[in-house]
């Protein structure tokens, strides 16, 4: 185990789940409110126990309780809100942004004793890595993980590296890990001389990596890696192979590994990965003249069919600068798309998919969890603290610092 989640000492005893008759729990289930009665692995991005009595979602006093708790904490606390959070949480954020931007903001506020990260697990880990030892990072619900980050477990990646070594290509391969990865994967990348990237600087990270080696192992999002390599770096689809950790040897041959320029980990975002080329074709048929704006975590055929592709910050800026009366179909998380549509009533902004699709794990951070976390801190009880083990933090920070040293990366955004 390379990280420790320090929660309340009043951890409930393991019990039984209240499930319908004939339904058995699965170890992969992401359980409501993170209340899995102590069954989950603390080293996993998946659900873990969230001790304490949460306020009821229907409590009409929640917003007022949040205001009182926030006022009582004052400058001792700094509340970070990721763009994909629901509005009821964003209302209490001191700053909003993407994952790396928020971690940087926290590090720039050393006077804040508590950093309350309204995001997901890997983001809170990054904040703990970058902030000072006197700051304590709190994740209001420990079940707020990331399915993409879960798709690359450290043991799997170490096994893959051994496969590359057996194929004789490890020494000429540079790992590049997306920001949306666990601290353990960032540390693996740092130990093996690699760097981190965000969705806005992936091209610069890859250019740096190709100066260091002949090929890249890109973790954990295959779509961002493929889209960047082919559409921005000039590689071909044939230069890319997908490494599947669930198949012997990754499901690729030694010859394929030796010929590849990009070894793409078989991972994806559960939100962006669901958009399809059919979605693009349908919205163009329904809204003449619509502009399709998508995130680079989308599939290759979606990205190549879109009018504009870029990070969350790029999507926000594009819509801010768009002319009145223009129409936009946006392929990213629905909370953000809804918020942008409200912010720009002079433009027609719609969700690219007909099916509602929130980031389910991001949405685990809700007002009851935020109120519970803040009120606990006001009462002097530390809850849901995220602490990355020292050696893991050291190597993860080394990889992050390599990214920050890249030209133009001083204000990198995810």
Image (cartoon, helix red, strand yellow):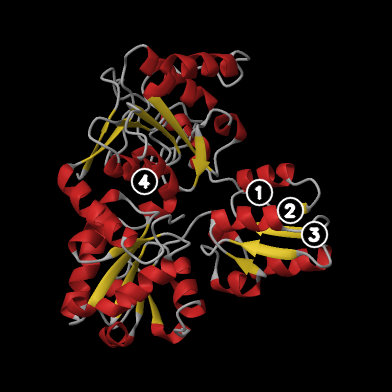
Q: Give the labeled residue for mark 3.
A: 326
Q: Where on the picture, by quarter, is residue 274?
A: bottom right
Q: Is residue 174 left or right of residue 100?
A: left
Could you tell me how far apart the alpha carbons at marks 4 and 1 are, in whole angstroms?
23 Å
Tell me the residue at 65%/73% (across/down): 305
Residue 330 in which image quadrant: bottom right
Badge 2 is on which residue? 350
Is the residue marked by circle 3 packed among few (<14), some (14-19), or many (20+) residues within 10 Å? some
Please tell me which of labels 3 and 4 falls first in the chain: 4
Tell me the quadrant of the picture where the N terminus can be found. Answer: top left
Image point (48%, 16%), residue name: 71
* Disc 2 + disc 3, Cβ < 8 Å: no
Question: Circle 1 sits on which residue?
Answer: 337
SS for tag 3? loop
Residue at screen point 55% across, 39% down: 85
In this view, the residue in front, 200 or 48, is 200
Q: Secondary structure at mark 4?
A: helix
How far apart marks 2 and 3 lie (CA) works out to: 11 Å
Residue 337 vertical placement versus 322 (above, below): above
Query: In the image, residue 364 lies at what x, y percent?
Result: 49, 35
C-beta proximity under 8 Å, tags 4 and 1 = no
Q: Secondary structure at mark 2?
A: strand
């Amino acid at each position: 185990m390379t990280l420790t989640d320090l929660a309340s000492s009043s951890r409930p005893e393991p019990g039984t789940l209240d499930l319908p008759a004939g339904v058995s729990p699965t170890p992969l289930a992401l359980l409501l409110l993170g209340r899995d009665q102590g069954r989950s692995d603390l080293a996993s991005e998946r659900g873990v126990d969230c001790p304490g009595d949460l306020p009821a979602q229907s409590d009409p006093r929640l917003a007022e309780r949040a205001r009182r708790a926030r006022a009582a904490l004052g400058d001792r606390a700094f509340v970070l809100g990721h763009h994909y959070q629901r509005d009821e949480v964003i209302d209490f954020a001191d700053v909003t942004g993407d994952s790396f931007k928020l971690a940087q903001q926290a590090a720039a506020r050393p006077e804040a004793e508590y950093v309350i990260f309204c995001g997901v697990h890997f983001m809170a880990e990054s904040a703990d890595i970058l902030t000072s030892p006197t700051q304590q990072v709190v994740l209001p619900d420990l079940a707020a993980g990331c399915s993409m980050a879960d798709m690359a477990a450290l043991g799997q990646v170490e096994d893959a590296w051994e496969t590359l070594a057996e194929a004789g290509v490890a020494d000429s391969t540079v790992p590049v890990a997306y920001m949306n990865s666990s601290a353990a994967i960032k540390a693996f990348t740092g130990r093996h001389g690699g760097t981190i990237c965000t969705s806005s600087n992936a091209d610069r990270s890859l250019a740096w990596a190709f100066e260091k080696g002949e090929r890249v192992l890109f973790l954990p999002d295959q779509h961002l890696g493929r889209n960047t390599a082919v559409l921005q770096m000039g590689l071909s689809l044939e230069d890319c192979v997908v490494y599947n950790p669930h198949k012997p040897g990754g499901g690729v041959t030694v010859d394929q590994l030796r010929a590849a320029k990009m070894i793409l980990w078989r991972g994806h975002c559960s939100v962006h990965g669901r958009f399809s080329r059919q979605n693009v074709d349908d919205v163009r048929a329904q809204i003449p003249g619509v502009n399709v704006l998508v995130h680079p975590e989308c599939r290759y055929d979606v990205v190549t069919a879109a009018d504009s592709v870029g990070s969350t910050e790029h999507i926000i800026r594009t819509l801010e600068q768009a002319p009145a009366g223009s129409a936009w179909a946006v392929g990213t998380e629905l909370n953000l798309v809804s918020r942008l549509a409200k912010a720009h009533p002079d433009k027609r902004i719609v969700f690219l998919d007909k099916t509602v699709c929130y980031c389910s794990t991001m949405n685990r951070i809700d007002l009851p969890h935020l109120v519970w976390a803040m009120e606990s801190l006001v009462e002097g009880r530390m809850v849901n603290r995220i602490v990355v083990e020292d050696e893991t933090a050291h190597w993860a920070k080394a990889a992050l610092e390599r990214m920050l040293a890249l030209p133009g990366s001083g204000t990198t955004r995810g």
